[in-house]
Image (cartoon, rainbow, N blue to C red):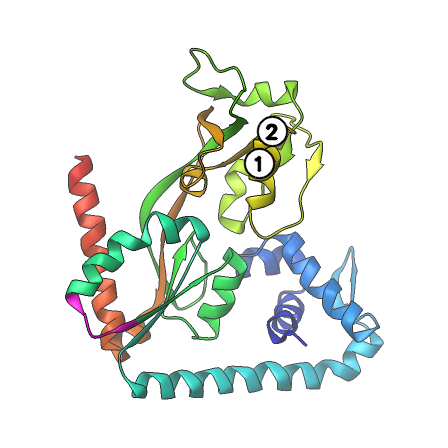
Amino acid sequence: MNVQKLNIILEALKYGSMTKAAEKLGYTQSALTYAINSTEQELGFPVVIRDANGIRLSKEGEELFPCIQDMVECEIRLMAKANEIKRRRGNVLNIAVYPSTADVLLPEILADFNKEAPDVTVNVTVGSYDDIIGWLMKYSIDFGIGGQMKLPGFEWIPLIEDPEMAILPLDFPTDGMTVFPMEDFKKHPFVEPVFWADETAMAKQIEKCGIVPQFNVTSPYNAPVIAMVEQGIALSTITKFTIQPHSKVKALPIDPPCSRILGASYHKKTCQDKLAAAKFLKCIKRWKKKREEAEE
C-alpha cells in the first residue's frame, strides 16, 4: 500500500474538495484522482464519495479512516527518525532532480559544490514533480530541483527560465522559420506532452489555441512523446532543457512564447541542521548570482 497516496486521501478530505486539495498540494487534479482511484482499486472498495458537494468518506472509508491515519503518521515518524540517524552518520547530501535538470542545471552547481565540500557523498535521484514533492515531505531528500513546489514550510529559489519548444521530425520543412506558430499544430497530428504541475501555462495555451491531441501518452516522462516525433508520427511541445540532450528531432521556440521556471526547493531546518546542505545552498545562490551577472 502506497502511504503517499493514503496521505493524498487525507488531504483531500481535509480540504473537502479535489480542486482545493490539488491547489494546496501543488498537484494536478488528475494526479489526485489517479492516486485515489488506484488506492481504491487496490483495496477493492470505494474509500471516498465525490459529488457536487465535494468529497467525503464512504461507509467503508469511515471504518478504514483510523487505520489510514495511523499508517500516514507512522511513516512520517519513521522517516523523521531515519533522517535524524542519517544526519548523525555524517556528510551525505541527498538531491532529487527532473531528468532535464540532471543533464543541464545540476552538473554546474555540483562542480562548484565539490570544490566547496570534497568530502561529502552526494546521492542524486531523478524523479517527476510528484516524486520530488513526496520525497521532500518525507525529508528523504535535502533539495528538490525542478519546478516551483508549493509546500508549507519549504523555501524555493527560482534559478532559470526554461522555454517551451515545438519539437518536429528532422525532415519537417522549416526553411526560414525562427519560431513555430501554435496555430500550425492544428495542421498536423499532435501528441500531447506530459505536463507536470509546474507546466500548467503550456497546457492552458494548448487548450486556448484549440489544439486537439490525436495521440495521448500516459507516462510520467516525455521519452515516448519524443520517440513518436522522431518517427514522424506527430508534432509536440517540450521544454528546452528537456529536449537539449536529444539530437533526432528539430526544436523551435513556440509563438506566442511560454516557459516554466526551474529552481530549488528545501526546508530551512535542513540547512540549519546539516552542514552539507548549508554548503550546497551557498553554491546554489552563488550559481544564480553568476548567471544573473552574466546576463546583465
- Quadrant the N terminus occupies: bottom right
The answer to whether the residues at label 1 and label 2 have Cβ atoms under 8 Å apart is yes
User: Secondary structure under badge 2?
Assistant: helix
Residue 24 appears in which quarter of the rendering? bottom right
- Which region of the structure is painted magenta? 116-121
Q: Mark 2 points at which residue?
A: 208
Residue at left 56%, top 32%? 230
Relative placement, left or right, of 42 versus 110 is: right
- Judged left or right of residue 64, residue 285 is left
63 shown above or below 278? below
Q: What element carries label 1?
A: helix
What is the x, y in percent for residue 226?
Answer: 56, 38
Res. 17 in view: no
Give the crowd class for mark 2: few <14, some 14-19, many >=20 residues within 10 Å. Answer: few
The residue nearer to you, when weighing 214 against 212, is: 214
Q: Is residue 183 visible?
A: yes
Q: Secondary structure of the magenta portion, mostly? A: loop
Classify 67 as above or below 22: below
Residue 253 spot, x, y in % from top left: 43, 26
Distance (Cα) linking label 1 and label 2: 6 Å
